[in-house]
Image (cartoon, rainbow, N blue to C red):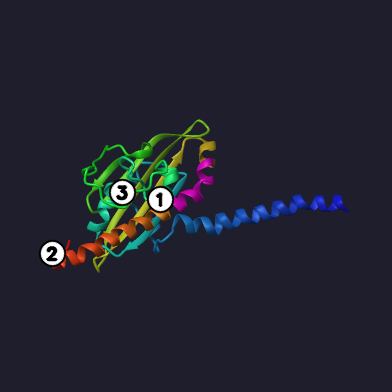
Amino acid sequence: MKRECAGWRLPVALINGLALGTFYLLFLRPQMIRWGTRLGESLRRLPGDDLIGAPGLVATRAINIDAPPEAVWPWLAQMGRERTGWYSLDLLGNNGIPSATYLRQDLGAPRPGLPLDLGLQVLEVEPNRELLIGGFDLPIPFESALDLTALYLLERMSDGSTRLLFRLRARAHSTAGQLLCWLLEPLEFLFSVQQLRAIRARAETMAYIRQPVARELEIPLD
């Protein structure tokens, strides 16, 4: 009897694993790579899409921010610079140093070619509108390398608020590297969602603080 039960364990475990894998690939993963987007947004052609051919991962995510692009941009402009942080999972992305909750005045404006933490660099900049960062031939385990671009696009809504679009494109140079990237997709999703929410919280707080100050001094808001 015990032998018969042991013989059933492997097929049951295999069936459960296949079921979980199917659920992840057909339902969960599509939701992860299009988190927050509206119909058609993930299919849009965006800046930086031509830099990596045949990527193994393309993720498009979006979030609404109750603040104008001018209140969002400063947080993007300082991100990933001299341990300012990426506003997400600081233990992994910033050597455990908490990401900044204030705007630094010592960094200056971002420019193409500016080096960032984690081996990335600024690729394209349009103030209050677009920040494209990335890296090529980034070393990863299994003696492989990774090409990666990340776009942050700010779109002003009719009510003055901001729609922030994020697009990640990545390609590993080997099969083993690509398998590793697929395994790390859930972690990348958590990193990305936490980052977008943190940017929203910082920008909305700054916009909320500026409004009464501007009214008191009779300064026009952006």
Pick the front one: 222 or 49: 222
SS at mark 2? loop
The residue singled out by tag 3 in the image is 47
Residues at marks 2 and 1 touching, judged by CB atoms closer than 8 Å: no
> Can you give x and y, in whole percent of width and height, for residue 110 in the image?
24, 43
Is 8 situated above or below 116?
Answer: below
Callout 3, which amino acid? Answer: Pro
SS at mark 1? loop
- For the point 29% across and 41% down, which residue is it? 123
Assess whether residue 194 is covered by the magenta stretch. no
The residues bearing labels 3 and 2 have C-alpha atoms spaced at a distance of 32 Å
The residues bearing labels 2 and 1 have C-alpha atoms spaced at a distance of 33 Å
The residue singled out by tag 1 in the image is 88
Assess whether residue 181 is covered by the magenta stretch. yes
Pick the front one: 207 or 152: 207
The tag earlier along the polypeptide, 2 or 1, is 1
Callout 2, which amino acid? Answer: Pro
Q: Quadrant of the C terminus?
A: bottom left
The region drawn magenta spans 180-191
Give residue 38's quadrant in the image.
Answer: bottom left
Magenta-highlighted stretch: main secondary structure? helix
**Which residue of the protein is positioned furthest toward the left in this rendering?**
218
The residue singled out by tag 2 in the image is 220
